[in-house]
Amino acid sequence: MTILVTGATGNLGRLIIESLIERGASADQIVAGARDVAKAADLGVRAVHLDYTDPASVSAALDGVDSVVLVSSSEVGQRFAQHKAVIDAAAAAGVTKFVYTSAPKATTTDLILAPEHKATEEAIAASGLPSVILRNNWYTENYVRDLATAAESGVLAAGVGDGRVASASRKDFADAAAVVLLEDGHLGQVYELGGDVAWNYDELAAAFAEITGRDVSYVRLGADEQVAALRAAGLDEGTAGFVAALDAGIRDGALADTDGTLARLIGRPTTPLVDGLRAAA
């Protein structure tokens, strides 16, 4: 078996490679696909040039590969075209297991980030690739910047209301990807993956307080108030509106569901919020 990990020099891709090796894969079974191969030199596996915007590089990277994990692109608005290049090349290469890191409830949610993931899942289905869809909830590491801000100001301000987030650490999600890549029995599955605990922002503020050693208060913002605050902080109107829309999705429950699937896949509890934040910070 030869496994190609795309986006291998990114935060999640690196951890997937580490998890594969921890779970018994040998280094010569793993190929790290990276836009800048030099950045993959410390991964301990063979690295190949793979640029989502260069279909020829994707096809070349797939030479001799049996399994692929497509780590979703971080370039919002360009993701689907980039993902489609990998899907098409994988289908042409006869890949026998195709794993994709998607978004929670990608095909049914109103979350602003979901449409590109929905389109990607549909393209995977249409391609006929034997696939596993991993719908990853939020990464706990997403809140490190908020933690730094709260350490200075004592305030966590957001427009999520009482919405809850079933986050987990990237390591948890990386372990899940390694499991489905290495084990049989997962093809055709769509896994909704989240942390064991869905927390709200009062609990997030309490976690910040525990880590920083100072009081941190959660300040609830209305949508217009949040956009105004983000504009005042220097964000352009489009970006401020995007952030506010993300928070609205959280407020409406887009990230709240958790049923223990992630913990069952990885064979251990997911990383608690405070522990994940502390490690990331």
Image: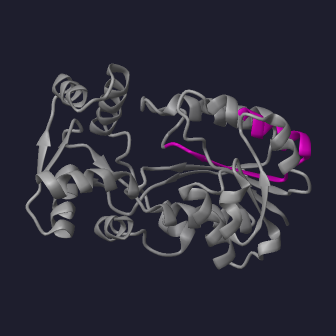
Where does residue 47 sit, x and y in percent of width and height? 77, 60
Where does residue 265 sit, x and y in percent of width and height? 56, 67
| Relative horizontal placement of residue 6, taking residue 197 as reference (left or right) | right
Q: Could you say which quadrant of the image residue 240 lies in?
A: top left
Where does residue 85 sit, x and y in percent of width and height? 76, 34
The residue that appears at 60% across and 29% down in the rendered structure is 78
The residue that appears at 47% across and 33% down in the rendered structure is 113
> Of 136 and 62, which appears nearest the observer?
62
| Relative horizontal placement of residue 253, taking residue 6 as reference (left or right) | left
Q: Could you say which quadrant of the image residue 196 lies in?
A: bottom left
Q: Does the magenta stretch include residue 196?
A: no
Q: In this view, does 240 lie above or below 263?
A: above
**Residue 171 visible here:** yes
> Of 159 and 281, which appears nearest the observer?
281
Q: In this view, does 49 lie above or below 27?
A: above
The part of the chain drawn in magenta is 84-103
> Of 164 and 261, which appears nearest the observer?
164
The residue that appears at 33% across and 50% down in the rendered structure is 165
Where does residue 191 sit, x and y in percent of width and height? 57, 52
Q: Is residue 89 magenta?
A: yes
Quarter in which the N terminus is drawn: bottom right
**Residue 5 visible here:** no
Q: Could you say which quadrant of the image residue 281 lies in?
A: bottom left
The residue that appears at 43% across and 72% down in the rendered structure is 269
